Each structure stands twice: as C-alpha cells, then as structure tokens.
Amino acid sequence: MIYFKFRAAWSQTRGVLSRALSLAAAGGTLVVLMGGLTGCAVPAGGSRDMLTAADDSDARKRARIHLELAVTYFSEGKTTIALDALKQSLSSDSGLFEAHNLRGLIYMRLNEPALAEEGFKKALSLQPNASSVQHNYAWMLCQQGRMADASAQFSAALANPNYDARAKTMMAHGVCQAKAGEAAAARTSLLGAYQLEPGNPVVVYTLASQLSKQGDSRSALAYIARINESQWANPETLWLGIKLARSNSEGLRMAQWSSALRARFAGSRELGLLERGAFDE
C-alpha cells in the first residue's frame, strides 16, 4: 500500500490548505493503493490457503508491473506517461481495483471528472469496501459540489474498522462540510482528525484555519502555536499565527512569529503582507 505522504515536504509546501487537499500536492489527500487483493484458494484436499502475488497469472503479474510504473510516474507528476503505463496494465489484466483507482486519480488531475468517476466506480465494483477508493471518490464529488454524495462516500470509508488513514479522511470530510456551510459538523470532523493524528501538521493547520474562519480565534491560536513552535512552521502557518496573535492581543507571540517570518522566509508572499500590514487579506 503506497500513500502520497505530505509530512516530509511540509516545510516547502505552499498553499497548505488547498494543496494538502489537491491531487497535485506534495503528498496531498488522495490515495494511491498498491498491493494485491487477498483471498482464499481451495485445493483439491479441501484446505484453505491465502492467495498471494505468487498465485498471480502471468497476465496479472504484467499488470502489476505496469501499475507500479504508473504509480511512480504519477507521484512524479508525469501524468501522461502514467496514463500510458496504466493503459498497459489494464490491457494485461483489467481486474485490479488499484488500477481503476489510479485511473480515477489520473483523470482527476487531467480535469476529466466523468472519466475519473468511471474509474472510481469500477474500482468499487471490484472491491466494494476499498476505503481509500471511497475517500478519493468522495473528494472528487466534493470538488464538484455534490456534497451529499461525497459525505456518503466519506462515511463509508470511515465505517471500515480496518481503514488506516482515518485522520486524512476525517480532515477531507471536514473541509467539504465547511464548504457546504456545515460549520458544526466540520469542526467535529477536524477535531476527530486531530485526535487521531495530533502530530500531523496539515491536520493541525486545517483545524486552526477552520476554527479561525468560524470566529474561534482563541482555540485557533492554541492549535497554530503547536506548528509555529515546531520544525514544521512555514510562511503560511506563521502568517496565520501572526494574524491570530494580533486579534487576541498576544503581542509577544506576534513579534516572535514576525521575526521568524522575516528571518526564515524573506522572499515569501506572507512577509510582503506583513510588511504592508495587510492583516485582512
């Protein structure tokens, strides 16, 4: 199973909230799944044995090789090359739900929502309880403004007790709920994501940003301080913290984070905003 993680590249990311929930981000919120389906084979003697990659047909082995290449190209932003490799995978064997999931992701990146939806639906027809596919499909639906359908897919993903990316799904769900004007539900989802991964800077930033928009600047300040006083501080987190410190009359924090922004991110857009006093932009 391969996830595009955002944590390693956090200090270099820009547009944290939008990028963290974007297909093109350095590790965004969407998930590419790799790894074989498992099942049980029943030999003549009647004993059961789990199916592994060793049991794959030659066609499926070829499909997996091409799929792995497609995932690599996709993660490097080489979308067209990834699509070519994916087509070779599907031509060898169209039965891998991971391949159809990737097809959905590729067409999302190419801004072809109808083809993306086709990929996700096919993946779910092959593996109905694939939470990562449900997550990706939900995010696409959210981007299209189909909030009820998106919420249903997010909820289905979270209903799987074996799903290991729950914080990411809760965070994305929370952002979509906020977009739909469901402030209370968004807060609940984002707090749930934080409880699962309190050390995840994207989760913390997203929660702080949403609390700030909801007018809870005191709580937002407490959360953004967790990032700004750590190695994960970047121009956007510092700028949000500066604005929140200002609104809460926290002069010392405002001065500290302003100094950090000047010293560490001299060419940033946020420093320009600070120097102009553009706190409302």
Image (cartoon, helix red, strand yellow):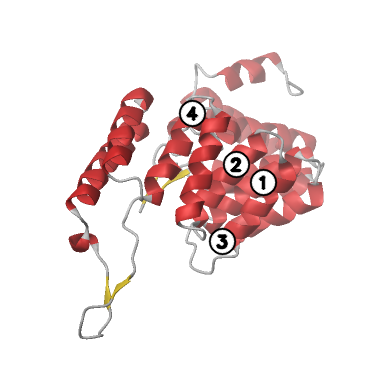
Give me the disc on residue 111: none
- Expressed as whole percent of the image width and height from the top left, the position of residue 212 reads 75, 40
Tell me how far mark 1 sits from mark 2, CA to CA: 7 Å
Q: Amino acid at mark 3?
A: Leu
Q: Secondary structure at mark 1?
A: helix
Q: Is residue 274 above or below residue 33?
A: above
Image point 53% across, 46% down: which residue?
121
Task: Check disc 2 and report the residue beneath it.
Answer: 139
Q: Residue at x 21, y 81 (%)?
A: 44
Q: Secondary structure at mark 4?
A: helix
Q: Secondary structure at mark 2?
A: helix
Q: Amino acid at mark 1?
A: Ala
Q: Secondary structure at mark 3?
A: helix
Kindly indicate whether the residue at mark 2 contacts the one at mark 1 (C-beta within 8 angstroms). yes
Mark in front: 3 vs 2: 2
- Residue 150's tag is 1
Look at mark 4 in the image and give the residue it sits on: 109
> Mark 1 or mark 3, which has the lower sequence index?
1
- Of the two numbered discs 1 and 3 in the rendering, the one whose residue sits closer to the viewer: 1
Left or right side of 33 for 275? right
Alpha carbons under labels 2 and 4: distance apart: 12 Å
Q: Residue at x 35, y 54 (%)?
A: 1
| Amino acid marked by disc 2 | Trp
CB atoms of marks 1 and 3 within 8 Å: no
Res. 196 mark: 3
